[in-house]
Image (cartoon, rainbow, N blue to C red):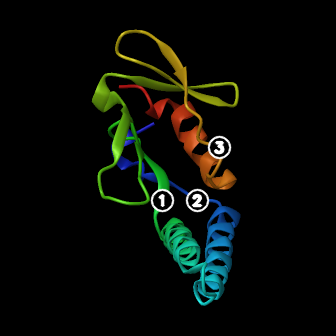
Amino acid sequence: MDNASTPVVEVRYKTGYSVTQIVVGGVFLAAGCFFAGIPGSTESGMMIVVAGAILLIFGLLALKRPYCSFDPAEGALYLHPLIGGRSRPIGAPRGERLYLDGDELKRVTADGKERALKLGFAANAEDLARLKAAVDAGAGSP
């Protein structure tokens, strides 16, 4: 496999994950506004409004930003945060090796320890399968 010509594989968040955060955030915003208008519960209402706004923002960001991306040319998996711009690399840039063990993505650290990568919770299943196929094709080796 020619790693230099292989495109970067992006893994998106599950749509249900993003939509759930948006819906729950909207419900919290509405409930918070309601409670903020009731005398004696203004402080609680405002805390609920803030929590709703945070969930809503995270849900909207999860629709637009990738969960992680794999660059076969570098042999690096980048985990992208929802807030902030610094992505943490895993793989060859840190002297590690990525490989597929059955259906589980694993890495061997620079000191020889083997660790499983848990990417399934919020990751889009189809994108995750493409990522695993790219790693299994030998692109995860430094």
Find numbered disc 3 in the image and state the secondary structure of the residue it sits on. Answer: loop
| Location of residue 103 with respect to 113 vertically, above or below | below
Residue type at mark 1 is: Pro
**141 sits to left or right of 124:** left
**Front-most of residues 125 and 116:** 116
Residue type at mark 2 is: Tyr
Find numbered disc 2 in the image and state the secondary structure of the residue it sits on. Answer: loop
**Front-most of residues 120 and 105:** 120
> Which residue carries the number 2 mark?
13
At horizontal 69% and vertical 68% (from top left) the residue drawn is 20
Q: Quadrant of the C terminus?
A: top left
Count residues near mark 2 (Cα–Cα under 10 Å), then give few for <14, some for 14-19, many for 20+: many
At horizontal 31% and vertical 22% (from top left) the residue drawn is 95
> Which residue carries the number 3 mark?
120
Q: Position of residue 49 (x, y in %)?
A: 54, 77
| Location of residue 19 with respect to 1 vertically, above or below | below
In space, the residues marked 1 and 2 are separated at their CA atoms by: 6 Å
Q: Quadrant of the N terminus?
A: top left
In space, the residues marked 2 and 3 are separated at their CA atoms by: 10 Å
Q: How many marks?
A: 3
| Location of residue 33 with respect to 19 vertically, above or below | below
In space, the residues marked 3 and 1 are separated at their CA atoms by: 14 Å
**Front-most of residues 3 and 46:** 46
> Which residue carries the number 1 mark?
66
